[in-house]
Every structure is written in structure tokens, then in C-alpha cells.
Image: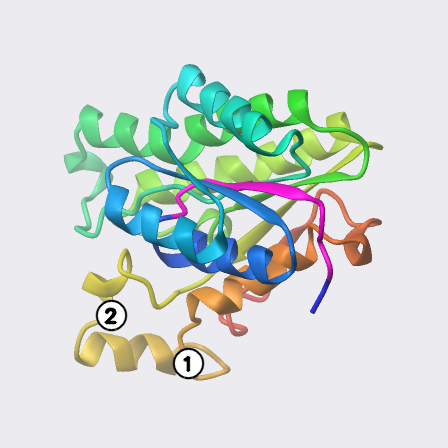
Amino acid sequence: MLDLSGRAVLVTGGSRGIGAATARLFARAGAKVALTYQTRAADAEQVAREVNGVALQADLRTPAGNEAAVQRTLDAFGRLDAFIANAGIWPPTGVAVRDMTDEQWHDTVASNLDSVFFGSRAAVRAMGPGSAVVIVSSTAGQRGEAMHADYASSKGAVIAFVKSLAVEAAPDITVNCVAPGWVDTEMAAPALRGADRAMVEAGIPLRRIASAEDIAGPILFLCTPLARHITGEILNVNGGSVLCG
């Protein structure tokens, strides 16, 4: 196990799925962990107890929510060494662009893109040399996703944001992206039922859907000294389903 003893991490969207798995893995590596949630207080508090960390309620779609989460992490641990921007939404019901409401578009962009900007801005202001930012995007941000243009667009913008921030934050802070494909989480569950699951698995060369832990491992790696010469990269974790650089 990689050793992150003495380092502090803030994981957004840590009450379930990839965020919860990431919080647990960082704790196993010795890091001090803060995690955010918006509505799932009981789940977030449970994860916080498991990792001996702190759960912070925050509306990440606002600058104030992100600034407060970073400040409370600093108050708890005295430092911030890694920021994991994981929180986001995927509206499970497909909607064509011609039928998509303004409200859905703006809500998805606020949840998936604005939150990343506000959170990363607050985090890099608080970080010192040797720190790391990892932002979770999606294969949809690289190839698009019909009937989910709002989601794909927000995730594609996140990838461009990572490449931009990586240059700005260098040489002190590395900034990278993990882009999962299908992941076996509660958020994706509506699309992975019955025959749909078998169809998705058949399109993945490794023939299985990733677990949340499969995504947490690469996130952790990018925050360790082993990745100190990696920045501005998009690490695809999709079982080979999207082969792109």
C-alpha cells in the first residue's frame, strides 16, 4: 500500500460510489480524509466514521459552498494536499437536445462543471508544493453520448479545464483527470438492469463493468509521489471500451 501518512485529502461527493471508495482507499494509505455531501447525511457520516475523517455538507454548485469545504478541511487538518473533484450527476432518463429543457441543461452544467471550477479554485489557493488535484470526468466527455448531451458536454469541458489548470498550477501542483467508463454504482444502476447490463458488458473488452474501487485506485496513484511527473493527463479507466489518448 502506498503511504500518504500526514497528508490531507478532500473528496467531493464522498457519501457513495466512487467518492466513498476513494475516501476509504486514501484512509487505508494513511491520509486524513474530509468528504463532502449534499443530501445523504447518514451515508456520508457512515463513511466518515469508517475513515476516521470528517463529513462536510456543502452545495458545490456555489463558490461559497466550495470555499467553506476547503476551509473546514484546513480547520480540521491544518493542511490540504489532495483535492478530488468527484461529485456530479448523470440524469438517467435520456433526452434529445431538441427536447431538453433549459433547467436540465443548467442543472447538469452547474453540478458537473461549475462545481469543478469553484472547488478547484478554492483548493489550489490553499495547496502548497507537492499537492495534487484529480478531477473525475467520463468517457462520455471524449466520445459524446446521444440523449445525454448535457452530461457529455459538461464532462468534455472538465477535460479541457484539467489541461488548462495543469499548466497554470505547475510546477507546484499536479492536475490530472480520471475518466471512467461504466461503473457499478447506484448512479448508474438504472441503466444496468437486466439485459442492458449484459449488452454493456459485451461492449467492454475486459468483459466486466468497473467497481468503484477500480476507479479509486488510479485516483490514489495520481496523488502519490509515483505520479509526480504526470500532469494534464486523462487516465482512461474503462476496460478498453474507449481507446483514446
Q: Which residue is mark 1?
A: 208
Q: Which residues are magenta?
A: 3-14
Image spot of residue 127 (x, y percent): 70, 28
| On screen, residue 114 above or below 239 | above
Image spot of residue 182 (x, y percent): 39, 65
Q: Is residue 128 left or right of residue 205?
A: right
- The reply to whether residue 244 is visible in this rendering is no
Crowding near pointer 1: few (<14 within 10 Å), some, many (20+)? some
Callout 1: SS: loop
Name the residue rendered at 34%, 26% in the picture.
59
80, 226: nearer the viewer: 80
Q: Quote the CA–CA distance across marks 2 and 1.
A: 12 Å
Crowding near pointer 2: few (<14 within 10 Å), some, many (20+)? many
Majority secondary structure of magenta residues: loop
Q: Which residue is mark 2?
A: 192
Name the residue rendered at 59%, 62% in the picture.
28
- The reply to whether residue 5 is visible in this rendering is yes
